[in-house]
Image (spheres, helix red, strand yellow):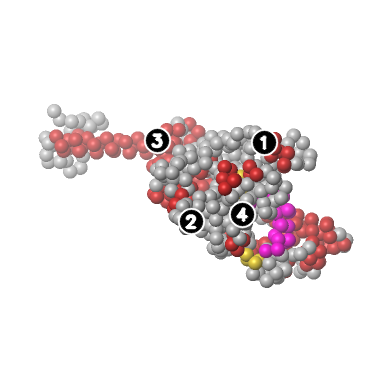
């Protein structure tokens, strides 16, 4: 019996170009049927994509997933709230001059911008594990400078629920004791952020010891291996002799240089204003931001990387590095602002680590001293934002890794193949978690995927998975130019 098309009632084979000569061949008929079905599927998919792009709010999740896979488009675009852009105030302009002033350092060669380069996402401009400073620029630091981008959203350091009286003096030790009996919540991508009842959160630097941009800006001025001023008098004298002295006088009057405390306070406030007002510190201009808004499309590798990033049984990155916009429309910060003990390997290239008895234990010291007795936090460091992570050349608090590939392999192999991550002693034993005293190893995260695996288990990610996750991480780099055709 001849087969007919539905619109013309012509034999189906005659309606196709170059109909096969062996129409009676069952194999040929099956091939033809497969082609027709494939065309139908493609037409249906195209229709679903068109519908989803035109009516995203009425698109079922299953159809949205098809759209993502086939087009790389976000079927549910959102509106992101960005900070307003305006000319810098006189206070911020003063802060800009301070930020780039090398004369404020003991060496005369180091400014804020030296370690927080605008051309490198306000992070270090080189691949050194840590930076050099001091009076002669010969002293090595022991932690890589974090990026200054997006710090305006960083919450204050705290432990446990927010205090009911925001103006009350905070006793972190008491908060730690109150939280000590609360079990640590497991962090799972796609689930609401873990309650901060036990884990500290917020603050600046790797250990959260500064709560404000002013305090963060002042810290390097006095650090002996950074700008290396020996006293506040040193800083005040240099500000008094600066090329922008008249700007201080215009803003604060003739008595500003007679009050050292006020001078330093206003100078650091000016630096903070520069960071808040200058949009280059928080542009939200990554490809992922534009994808969220429906203004860019992800490649297949980037899309797959995003899925793995959010998959609680795979990379589970979003368990700590939250990837969804906030309920009020703020772009995702890719951090939960909490602290983790990850047990990264010791970096023996750091001068401080040449002393075998020295350990950088984050919240427990050496820079913080107020929580040194709270040993349940030893080894914990702040979870950084992953925005612009692909522009960095060093990772973790000790700069032990220099590529995202190495970072992902650490997460993938730390517990299932520790011999590939950590050094061995003279007898061949693996020195796992070698950058933290053994008595604090219980603080290390072993519950959250992919750290929930045991020795010899299969890895949670393949090499191709890791490549795709890194492809996605590259979409978090600011400065992407969206294709206007995708608007």
Left or right placement of residue 122 versus residue 169 in this view: left
Which residue was labeled with disc 1? Answer: 179
* Quarter the N terminus occupies: top left
Spatial separation of the CA atoms under disc 4 and disc 2: 18 Å
Asked whether residue 300 is in view, the answer is: no
Question: Residue at horizontal 70%, vertical 61%?
Answer: 223
* Mark linked to residue 359: 4
Q: Helix or strand or loop: what does disc 2 sit on?
A: loop
The span picked out in magenta is 206-225
Question: Residue at horizontal 61%, vertical 60%?
Answer: 355
Mark 2 and mark 3 in contact? Answer it, CB < 8 Å.
no
Query: Where in the figure is residue 175, as x and y percent of width and height?
Result: 71, 38
Q: Helix or strand or loop: what does disc 1 sit on?
A: helix
Mark 4 or 3: in front is 4
Of label 1 and label 2, which has the lower sequence position?
A: 1
Spatial separation of the CA atoms under disc 4 and disc 3: 57 Å
Label 4: how many Cα within 10 Å (few below 14, some 14–19, many 20+): some
Spatial separation of the CA atoms under disc 1 and disc 4: 25 Å
Mark 1 and mark 2 in contact? Answer it, CB < 8 Å.
no
Q: Helix or strand or loop: what does disc 4 sit on?
A: loop
Mark 4 or 2: in front is 2
């Amino acid at each position: 019996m001849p087969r007919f098309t539905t619109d013309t009632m012509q034999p189906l084979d005659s309606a196709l170009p170059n109909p096969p000569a062996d129409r009676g061949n069952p194999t040929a008929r099956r091939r033809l049927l497969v082609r027709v079905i494939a065309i139908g599927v493609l037409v249906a998919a195209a229709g679903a994509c068109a519908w989803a792009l035109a009516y995203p709010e009425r698109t079922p999740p299953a159809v949205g997933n098809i759209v993502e896979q086939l087009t790389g488009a976000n079927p549910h675009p959102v509106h992101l709230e960005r900070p307003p852009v305006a000319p810098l105030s006189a206070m911020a302009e003063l802060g800009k001059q301070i930020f780039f002033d090398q004369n404020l350092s003991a060496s005369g060669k180091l400014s804020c911008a030296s370690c927080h380069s605008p051309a490198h996402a306000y992070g270090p401009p080189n691949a050194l594990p840590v930076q050099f400073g001091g009076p002669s620029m010969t002293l090595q630091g022991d932690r890589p400078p974090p990026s200054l981008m997006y710090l305006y959203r960083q919450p204050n350091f705290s432990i446990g629920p927010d205090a009911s009286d925001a103006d009350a003096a905070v006793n972190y030790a008491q908060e730690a004791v109150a939280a000590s009996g609360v079990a640590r919540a497991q962090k799972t991508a796609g689930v609401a952020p873990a309650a901060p009842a036990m884990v500290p959160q917020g603050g600046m630097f790797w250990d959260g010891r500064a709560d404000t941009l002013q305090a963060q800006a002042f810290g390097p001025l006095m650090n002996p291996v950074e700008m290396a001023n020996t006293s506040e008098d040193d800083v005040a004298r240099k500000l008094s002799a600066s090329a922008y002295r008249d700007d201080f006088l215009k803003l604060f009057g003739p008595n500003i240089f007679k009050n050292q405390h006020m001078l330093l306070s206003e100078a650091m406030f000016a630096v903070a204003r520069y960071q808040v007002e200058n949009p280059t510190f928080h542009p939200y201009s990554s490809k992922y931001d534009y994808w969220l808004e429906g203004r860019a499309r992800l490649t297949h590798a980037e899309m797959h990387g995003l899925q793995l990033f959010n998959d609680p049984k795979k990379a589970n990155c979003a368990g700590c590095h939250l990837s969804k916009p906030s309920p009020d429309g703020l772009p995702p910060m890719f951090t939960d602002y909490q602290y983790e003990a990850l047990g990264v390997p010791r970096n023996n290239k750091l001068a401080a680590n040449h002393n075998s008895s020295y350990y950088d234990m984050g919240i427990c010291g050496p820079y913080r001293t107020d929580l040194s007795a709270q040993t349940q936090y030893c080894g914990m460091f702040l979870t950084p934002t992953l925005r612009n992570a692909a522009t960095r050349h060093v990772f973790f608090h000790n700069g032990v890794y220099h590529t995202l590939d190495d970072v992902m392999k650490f997460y993938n192999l730390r517990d299932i193949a520790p011999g590939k991550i950590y050094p061995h002693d003279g007898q061949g034993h693996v020195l796992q978690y070698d950058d933290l005293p053994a008595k604090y190893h219980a603080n290390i995260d072993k519950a959250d995927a992919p750290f929930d695996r045991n020795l010899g288990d299969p890895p949670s990610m393949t090499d191709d998975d890791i490549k795709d996750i890194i492809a996605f991480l590259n979409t978090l780099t600011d400065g992407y130019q969206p294709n206007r055709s995708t608007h």
